[in-house]
Image (spheres, rainbow, N blue to C red):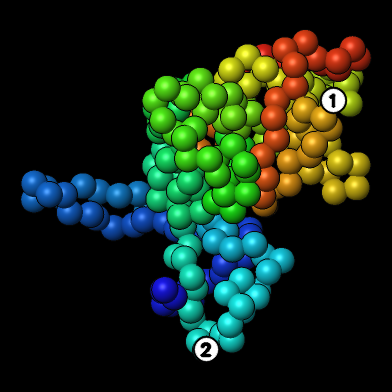
Amino acid sequence: MVRIFLRRFTGLPGLGAVLLTACSGTSHLSDGKVSPQPALSQKSVVTTKILPTTDPDVTFAQFHQEKITSPIAYHTPPVSAFRDRPFKDTLSTSLEAADYIFALKKAGWFPLLGGDISLTILVPSNEAMEADARFADQSIFQPERKAALRQALGGTILIGTWDKSHIMAALKRHRATTLALRTIDHRFINVSMDAQTLQPVFIGAGGKALILWGDATEQTNGVFYIAKNLIDPVSPTPKAGRTMLQTAH
């Protein structure tokens, strides 16, 4: 069913749309009291990022295999990611992360998204989850297969905040070309920087690269990326010549 939403921001639902909002004047609380808000001159600015709702390389018509009948029609609503919120608030409202959030809850890892531990979440899109044979088998969500579910999701949660700036700083500090980042289940995902695009490249077992869907999105407890596929962590011992980082940044 096609849902209709007003096109309030040019370019939706593409990547990188950023909305800057500021508050001024007063706001009324539920108890009837008035709380003063900082004036615009005080630069009270909240940054929010509009998350993608469909692959930007695929047009609306191609996605639905039908002709567009309205310039304001989207198959899913755009979702705002406020950087003053934790993962659980943002990802729980994103339809594109619905399958992943369901799996995290079944695995018992969803509470981590609201905690104080600094994390990097490699969020697989719904299509990525549905294309993975492990999740196509619904039995993996049964309580008796919780260990298998955790293993399948292990490569999606990294310890520490690993956006582009932190990755580049760590590579420079350690004079390395590749870092081995610890996952939540004590395995590793390798990361390096693409020399041409200067974007991070996450590599898993068998040299499989994560296909990122845009840049990192900042949250209060780390950053997350939306990805078009899943990768499995490498063995607990990183390969020789690579720098292993385990702590949060």
Camera-side residue of 123 and 12: 123
Give the secondary structure at mark 1.
loop
Q: Which residue: 47% across, 40% down?
A: 138
- The answer, for residue 224, to whether it is visible in the render is no
Residue 159 place in picture, x, y as percent: 60, 22
The label number, if any, that marks residue 103 in the structure image: none
Residue most extreme to the bottom: 69
Camera-side residue of 30 and 109: 109
Give the secondary structure at mark 2.
loop
Residue at image mark 2 = 69
Q: Is residue 217 left or right of residue 175?
A: left
Residue 119 place in picture, x, y as percent: 56, 27
Camera-side residue of 171 and 232: 232
Viewer-side label of 1, 2: 2
Residue at image mark 1 = 178
Q: Is residue 212 left or right of residue 20?
A: right
Q: For label 1, count other residues whose C-alpha is less than 10 Å away and answer few (under 14), some (14-19) or many (20+).
A: many
Q: Amino acid at mark 1?
A: Thr
Residue 73 place in picture, x, y as percent: 48, 79
Q: Which quadrant, please, contains the N terminus?
A: bottom left
